[in-house]
Image (tube, grey):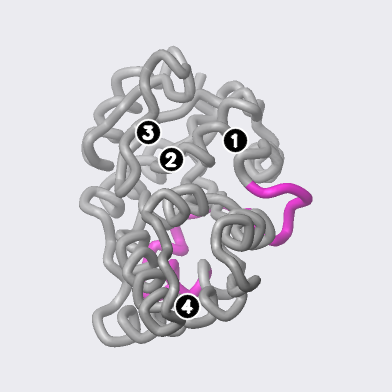
């Protein structure tokens, strides 16, 4: 029986990964460095310390913190000008979960202040029973900590909490936590089915709603 739905945020709820990717490109332009797409993809969905390791191992000069600040400045300016871009079907999915008494829990690598600001700006904060933020758990995705903490926040069995994710790092974390997962690909293609990192694949959050309604007794 489905006991809860654990939501990633960037790239899953909000179309912010594209803004972040463009921010990395802007930072690379300003710093006159080559930042391959593969490095940007490897940093997607994990925590700041792990991103720093990945970036500085690939790019000379220990420039991660400078580049990250430039990326954040770019993203903040774009979102201030245009608002937080909401993924199609998010509000409908959250309303359906609320009406069905299925708790929704935010489980994001983003820091608390920024994540809560996004929820408030898009008027979806009221739909979440609890929230867990990456900097507040011991290990970032792909470790299972954030999803274990999210399940614990609603006193649920992780095996009966469905994770919604777009990134391989997040899917690895879900698998390590023992949670079934629905992948909704964003910038990074879904891992091959043979990797056994997801139970269902959906093209968008509207399809996620259909999957949950159909499969909730099995989850």
Dot label at residue 165: 2
**CB-based contact (under 8 Å), mark 1 and mark 2:** yes
The x and y percentages for residue 186 are 30, 46
C-alpha gap between disc 4 and disc 2: 22 Å
Q: Is residue 76 above or below residue 123?
A: below
- Residue 21 included in the magenta stretch of the image: no
First-in-chain label (2 vs 3): 2
Nearer to us: label 3 or label 4: 4
Looking at marks 4 and 1 on the same chain, the residue that comes earlier in the sequence is marked by 4
Report the Cα–Cα distance between label 2 and label 3: 5 Å
Going by the image, does 168 lie left or right of 213?
Answer: right
Tell me where the magenta segment starts and ends, as one range. Answer: 116-140
**Badge 3 element:** strand
Q: Secondary structure at mark 4?
A: helix
Q: Quadrant of residue 133?
A: bottom right
Farthest-out residue, right: 138
Q: Is residue 131 above or below residue 114?
A: above
Apparent side of residue 157 relative to residue 118 in the rendered image (left or right): right
Query: What percent of the width, then of the height, locates residue 14?
Result: 34, 59
Q: Indicate which disc, 4 or 2, sits on the residue closer to the N terminus.
A: 4
Q: Which mark is residue 173?
A: 1
- Cα–Cα gap, marks 3 and 4: 26 Å
Q: Is residue 131 magenta?
A: yes
Q: Earlier in the sequence, mark 3 or mark 1?
A: 1
Q: CA distance from mark 1 to mark 2?
A: 10 Å
In the depicted structure, whether residue 90 falls above or below residue 6: below
Q: Which mark is residue 183?
A: 3
Foreground residue, 62 or 49?
A: 62
Say if mark 2 contacts mark 3, CB within 8 Å: yes
Q: CA distance from mark 3 to mark 1?
A: 12 Å
- Residue assigned mark 4: 72
Tell me the crowding category of disc 3: few under 14, some 14 to 19, or many 20 or more residues within 10 angstroms, Cα based: many
């Amino acid at each position: 029986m489905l006991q809860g739905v654990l939501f990633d945020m960037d790239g899953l709820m909000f179309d912010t990964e594209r803004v972040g990717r463009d921010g990395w490109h802007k930072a690379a332009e300003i710093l006159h460095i080559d930042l391959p797409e593969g490095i940007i993809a490897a940093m997607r969905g994990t925590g700041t310390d792990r991103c720093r390791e990945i970036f500085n191992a690939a790019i000379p000069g220990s420039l991660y913190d400078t580049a990250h600040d430039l990326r954040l400045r770019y993203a903040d300016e774009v979102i201030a000008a245009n608002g937080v871009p909401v993924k199609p079907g998010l509000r409908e999915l959250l309303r359906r979960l609320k009406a069905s008494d299925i708790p929704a829990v935010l489980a994001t690598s983003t820091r608390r202040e920024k994540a809560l600001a996004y929820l408030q700006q898009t008027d979806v904060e009221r739909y979440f029973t609890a929230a867990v933020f990456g900097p507040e758990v011991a290990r970032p995705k792909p470790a299972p900590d954030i999803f274990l903490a999210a399940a614990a926040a609603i006193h649920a069995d992780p095996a009966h909490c469905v994770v919604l994710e777009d990134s391989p790092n997040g899917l690895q974390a879900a698998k390590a936590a023992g949670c079934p997962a629905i992948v909704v690909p964003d910038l990074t293609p879904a891992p091959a089915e043979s990797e056994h990192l997801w139970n269902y694949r959906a093209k968008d959050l509207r399809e996620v709603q259909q999957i949950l309604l159909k499969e909730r007794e099995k989850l």
